[in-house]
Amino acid sequence: MIKVVNLTKKFGDFVAVDDISFEVDKGEVFAFLGPNGAGKTTTIKMLTTLLKPTSGAILINSIDPLTNQAKARKAFGITFQDQSLDDELTAWENMEFHGVLYGVPKKLRRERIEELMKIVELWDRQKSLVKEFSGGMKRRLEIARGLIHHPAIIFLDEPTLGLDPQTRNHIWDYIKSLNEKESITVFFTTHYMPEAEKMASRIAIIDHGKIVAQGSAQELEQKTSTSNLEDAFLALTGKDIRVQEVSGTDRMRQNRRIWRR
C-alpha cells in the first residue's frame, strides 16, 4: 500500500531524510516514531505530495505521487499535526467543502457527511461554528473530514496531541474499528509510546533522518533488551533532549539570517 525506496530529502547541505526504505501493507496500522527533528514530518510531507524528494521512489496505493499527484491524493486522507479546519465555518460546512474539493458526488457526499459525523459523535453539532468546539471535538472533526472521500490510506500526524485520555481512547476506538471493517491502512506518528505499542502492528523508528529500527513493539523490545516500547525507543535514539523539528524553508530562513550577521 505504501512503498518507499532510498528516499532522501536535502535542504541545501542539510540532509533531513537520509536514504530511507520501508513498506506498509494494505490494512496495516503502522507507527512512524522519532524524536523532534528526526525527519518524521518531512517524510510525511513527501508521502502526501507536499514536498518533492531529492531522490528515491514512493508508491502510494501503486501510484507514483511524483508523476500523478491528483490521483495519489485521492488515495489518502490526512490529519495534520496543526489544526487545519476553518473556524469561521460550521462543522457541516467544513465537511461539505472538503467533499467538494475531492469531487465526491453530492448524494454520496451528504450521506458520507452524516455517517462520519455520527460516528465521531458530532452530528448534533453540525450547525455549530468550529471556533466554538473544544480541541477534542476539532480533532474528531478533522479525522472525519480526512475520511470523507473513502481513502485507502489515512495519514495521522500526532492525531491525539493534547487530548484527554477519554477523547484519545474514543478516537482510537473509531480508527481501529474503521481499520477492521474497511481494511483502511493507517500510518501515524505519535509521542505517546503506549499508544504506538497498543495500536500499531509494526513500527519504524527514525532518528537523524535515518531509520534505525523496524518491527513490532515486542521485536524492538527484544532487540534492545527492554521491557516496554518507551525504553526501547530511548535505547535506540538516546536520552538527549532534541530541538523541535523545523521545515526546510524555516531552516533556510534561519541560515540566511545567520549568514547576514
Image (cartoon, rainbow, N blue to C red):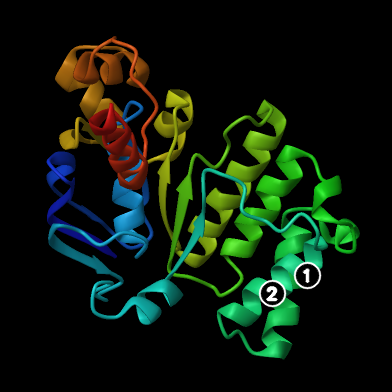
Residue at the (66%, 31%) spot, across then down: 163
Q: Are marks 2 and 1 in contact (CB under 8 Å)?
A: yes
Q: Position of residue 31 (x, y in %)?
A: 36, 41
Quadrant of the snapshot with the N terminus: bottom left
The numbered disc on residue 105 is none
The residue lying toward the viewer, choosing from 22 and 57, is: 57
Q: Position of residue 158 (x, y in %)?
A: 50, 39
Residue at the (22%, 26%) spot, across then down: 220
In the picture as drawn, the residue positioned furthest to the front comes out as 261
The amino acid at mark 2 is: Phe
Residue at the (29%, 49%) spot, across then down: 43
Mark 2 is surrounded, within 10 Å at the Cα level, by few (under 14), some (14 to 19) or many (20 or more) other residues, namely few
The residue lying toward the viewer, choosing from 161 and 204, is: 161
Q: Position of residue 126 (x, y in %)?
A: 85, 62
The amino acid at mark 1 is: Glu
Left or right: residue 56 compared with residue 129: left
Residue 251 appearing in the image: yes
Q: Position of residue 170 (x, y in %)?
A: 67, 41
Q: Secondary structure at mark 1?
A: helix
The residue lying toward the viewer, choosing from 193 and 239, is: 239
Residue hosting label 2: 97
